[in-house]
Structures are given as structure tokens and as C-alpha cells.
């Protein structure tokens, strides 16, 4: 009887100990610190998709992939941050469609096509809100055309823009600028030109931006 | 065929040795699955990486099972950890009690892990098209558990 209790007790201790250790190991931050060699990013130009005050003291650039679930999870956080701090911060969205996401490039093209009719952010919102609907869809273009209709876009122009080389080049440019800045995952954020570790939630995001605002004051 | 089967059964050792082996395999699976589950729940929002591999697999829609009551779904790694914990407890109970009924139950129960592993490996190979080492370790341990449990059942007199 005593042996039995010892056996179960030893195993319970080993199992609980290992699980505890594993959880500690896994919860260590995986995002590599930018370290001494701070990664910087190219400055914003007028052609880009910008939201918020253009004269703002802080600039947040997001490299994002419309089909990436993590970017989808950040979408409501960023929306709230931009609503709350919109006057103090300008937000720029840059495309970084990852090769494993088959509809990501199309989604980026669709957002840009809407952008050429002045509705980039409206389309951006719709694409993220409906991410799970179109992500694995073979004919995502049909859904995107529906969103364009919803936004009251000129559909003929929208279709021409989707095929345009200019928009393709713009997305390609964004991607290249990301690679140059060391982006290897999405979303990646650059605050005032410097890469930051991805904030875990709304509060961390707000704090990071407010800190940057404090510094530039 | 029968000869090679008995040979393998002998290689695996006495019933107690087999139960110990199952315990070790399930411990390996438990550690592996808990690591993935812990990563899933502690990294609030794991990013999508450019390199194909674990990130692609663990951030895919197949990494969670949707339940309306649970926001974000249940991580399949967590279900895996629970499965291995149950197998571990049963294997120790077999070492402890040498119960034939438990051996028989374990042989049936281990089919769940085997099928789940086949499902996840096929998803990775044919749908996600990326392999994650942690998932391969898990597939190895559940297959090993299934094989050992099958031979452990053979040792029993219960049919």
C-alpha cells in the first residue's frame, strides 16, 4: 500500500513539475528584441494609406497581411487605438502578403482598388471583419466584389483597377520596403520609424504610443 | 506474420514493461502537447511568420476547434495534453493493478490518438503544406502508444 502511494506521488510530482516548467518556458517572449541594431523603416510618403492627423507627432506603420489571423485579431485593437488617439497619431497600412496565404495578395489589391476611389480604410475594415468568410474561399473575388458594391464603388472602375499594374507595383513596393526593414512576420509595427515588439493588447498599444508621444513632446 | 508479431511483443517486454513504455510515451506526448498549448494561450496573438513551419501550422484555422462558448476556440494541443494525461494515468494504473480490463480499455482508447494523429499529419501534408516538428513528435508518441497498447492487450486473457 505504501509503495503504491509513493509510486503515484512521485509520478504526480514529476508530471506537475514538468508541465509547470514547460508553461514557464513557453511563455517567455518569443519576439526577438530589436537589440542594439534597431530596425528602421522607410518614411511615409503621400501616396500611402494613412489614417489620423497628418501633422501628428507619432507615426505608426503596420505591415500586415489581410489573410493572417493575427492581423485579424489586431484589427479591432488598432481600430480602437486609432479612434482614441487618432488626433495624435497617424497610422499607415503597408501590405505584406505572405506566400502561404493564397488570397492575401488579392485582398491587398482589392483594398488598393477601393483606395483609388477614396475608400481604402472602409474596404480594409470590411476585409478584416469578414476575414474568415473569404480566407479559404476559392472564388474570393466574388465576395470582394460584393464588398465593393456595399461601399458604393464604381464597379467597372474597381474591376479595371484590380487588374492594374500600378496597384500591383504599389503592393510589391510595400512588401520590398518591409523586407528591407527586416519584417519577417505579420503584423509588424514600426513606431516613429523603429520596430516595436508586438503589444499584447489595447492597453499595451496605447501605452507604447503615449510613451512615444511623451518623448517627441 | 504471427511469428514476427510475437517477436515484437517479446521485444517490448513483459506486460509491466509495456505499461511503463506506454507511460513514457504518453509523458513525452504530454510534455510536447502542453508546450504547444501553453504557447497557444500565453502568446496572446501569435504572429504569422514568413518561414513555413510551426507558425503556419499553429496559427492555422485547424489549430483550434471552434466552440460557440469559447472565444477563439479550444486549442487542439490542449485536447492532446488531456489525452496524454489520461493515457499516462491509465498506464500507471495498469502497472499498479495489472488489471486486464484496463489494458483492454487502453488498447481501444489509444485508437483516438492514432486517428487524431493521422488526421493532423494529413492536414499538414495536404492542406496546410507545412510540417511542425512538435506535431510530428506527438504523432510518433500516439502511434507508439497505440502499438504498445495493442500488444499489451494481447497479453491479457480477456477477449
Image (tube, rainbow, N blue to C red):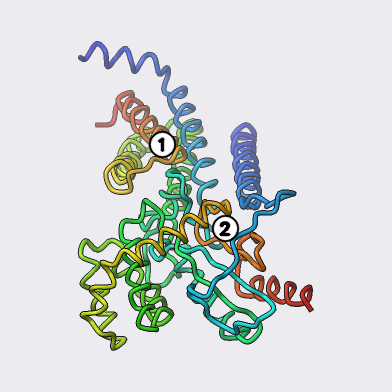
Please tell me which residue is depicted at 65% across the width and 64% down the height of the picture: A193
User: How many numbered discs?
Assistant: 2
In-front residue for pair B99/B39 = B39
Would you place residue A113 above or below residue B99 in this image? below
Would you place residue A57 above or below residue B82 in this image? below
Q: Is residue A212 visible?
A: yes
| Quadrant of the rendered image containing residue B94 | top left
- How far apart marks 1 and 2 lie (CA) works out to 22 Å
Q: Which residue is mark 2?
A: B43
Precedes in sequence: disc 1 or disc 2: 2
Query: Which quarter of the figure is the C terminus of chain B placed in?
Result: top left
**Horizontal arrangement in the rendering, residue A82 relative to residue A148 (left or right):** right
Cβ atoms at labels 1 and 2 below 8 Å apart: no
Please tell me which residue is depicted at 52% across the width and 56% down the height of the picture: A178
- Mark 2 secondary-structure assignment: loop
Subunit that carries the residue with mark 1: B
| Quadrant of the rendered image containing residue B113 | top left
In-front residue for pair A23/A100 = A100
Point out residue A159 in the picture as x, y percentages from the top left corner.
23, 74
To the question of a shared chain for discs 1 and 2, the answer is yes
Subunit that carries the residue with mark 2: B
| Marking on residue B136 | 1
Point out residue B57 in the picture as x, y percentages from the top left corner.
41, 49
Point out residue B49 in the picture as x, y percentages from the top left corner.
48, 51
Q: Is residue B109 visible?
A: no
Neighbours of disc 1 within 10 Å: few (<14), some (14-19), many (20+): some
Point out residue A101 in the picture as x, y percentages from the top left corner.
35, 56
Please tell me which residue is depicted at 37% across the width and 72% down the height of the picture: A112
Neighbours of disc 2 within 10 Å: few (<14), some (14-19), many (20+): some
| Marking on residue A43 | none
- Mark 1 secondary-structure assignment: helix
Amino acid at each position: 500500500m505504501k509503495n503504491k502511494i509513493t509510486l503515484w506521488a512521485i509520478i504526480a510530482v514529476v508530471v506537475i513539475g514538468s508541465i509547470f516548467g514547460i508553461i514557464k518556458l513557453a511563455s517567455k517572449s518569443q519576439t526577438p528584441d530589436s537589440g542594439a541594431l534597431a530596425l528602421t523603416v522607410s518614411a511615409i510618403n503621400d501616396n500611402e494609406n494613412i489614417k489620423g492627423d497628418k501633422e501628428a507627432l507619432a507615426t505608426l506603420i503596420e505591415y500586415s497581411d489581410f489573410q493572417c489571423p493575427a492581423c485579424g485579431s489586431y484589427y479591432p485593437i488598432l481600430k480602437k487605438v486609432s479612434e482614441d488617439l487618432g488626433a495624435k497619431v497617424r497610422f499607415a497600412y503597408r501590405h505584406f502578403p505572405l506566400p502561404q496565404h493564397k488570397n492575401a495578395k488579392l485582398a491587398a489589391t482589392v483594398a488598393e482598388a477601393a483606395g483609388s476611389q477614396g475608400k481604402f480604410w472602409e474596404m480594409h475594415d470590411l476585409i478584416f471583419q469578414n476575414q474568415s468568410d473569404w480566407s479559404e474561399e476559392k472564388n474570393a473575388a466574388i465576395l470582394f466584389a460584393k464588398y465593393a458594391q456595399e461601399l458604393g464603388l464604381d464597379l467597372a472602375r474597381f474591376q479595371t483597377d484590380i487588374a492594374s499594374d500600378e496597384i500591383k507595383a504599389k503592393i510589391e513596393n510595400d512588401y520590398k520596403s518591409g523586407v528591407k526593414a527586416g519584417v519577417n512576420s505579420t503584423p509588424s509595427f514600426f513606431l516613429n520609424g523603429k520596430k516595436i515588439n508586438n503589444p499584447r493588447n489595447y492597453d499595451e498599444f496605447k501605452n507604447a504610443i503615449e510613451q512615444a508621444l511623451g518623448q517627441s513632446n | 506474420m504471427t511469428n514476427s508479431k510475437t517477436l515484437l511483443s517479446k521485444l517490448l517486454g513483459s506486460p509491466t514493461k509495456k505499461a511503463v513504455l506506454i507511460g513514457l510515451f504518453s509523458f513525452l506526448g504530454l510534455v510536447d502537447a502542453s508546450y504547444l498549448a501553453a504557447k497557444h494561450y500565453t502568446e496572446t496573438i501569435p504572429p504569422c511568420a514568413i518561414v513555413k513551419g510551426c507558425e503556419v501550422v499553429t496559427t492555422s484555422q485547424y489549430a483550434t476547434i471552434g466552440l460557440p462558448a469559447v472565444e477563439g476556440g479550444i486549442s487542439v494541443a490542449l485536447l492532446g495534453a488531456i489525452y496524454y494525461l489520461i493515457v499516462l494515468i491509465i498506464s500507471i494504473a495498469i502497472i499498479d493493478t495489472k488489471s486486464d480490463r484496463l489494458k483492454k480499455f487502453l488498447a481501444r482508447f489509444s485508437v483516438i490518438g492514432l486517428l487524431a494523429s493521422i488526421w493532423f499529419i494529413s492536414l499538414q501534408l495536404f492542406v496546410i503544406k507545412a510540417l511542425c516538428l512538435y506535431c510530428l513528435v506527438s504523432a510518433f508518441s500516439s502511434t507508439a502508444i497505440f502499438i504498445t497498447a495493442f500488444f499489451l492487450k494481447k497479453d491479457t486473457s480477456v477477449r
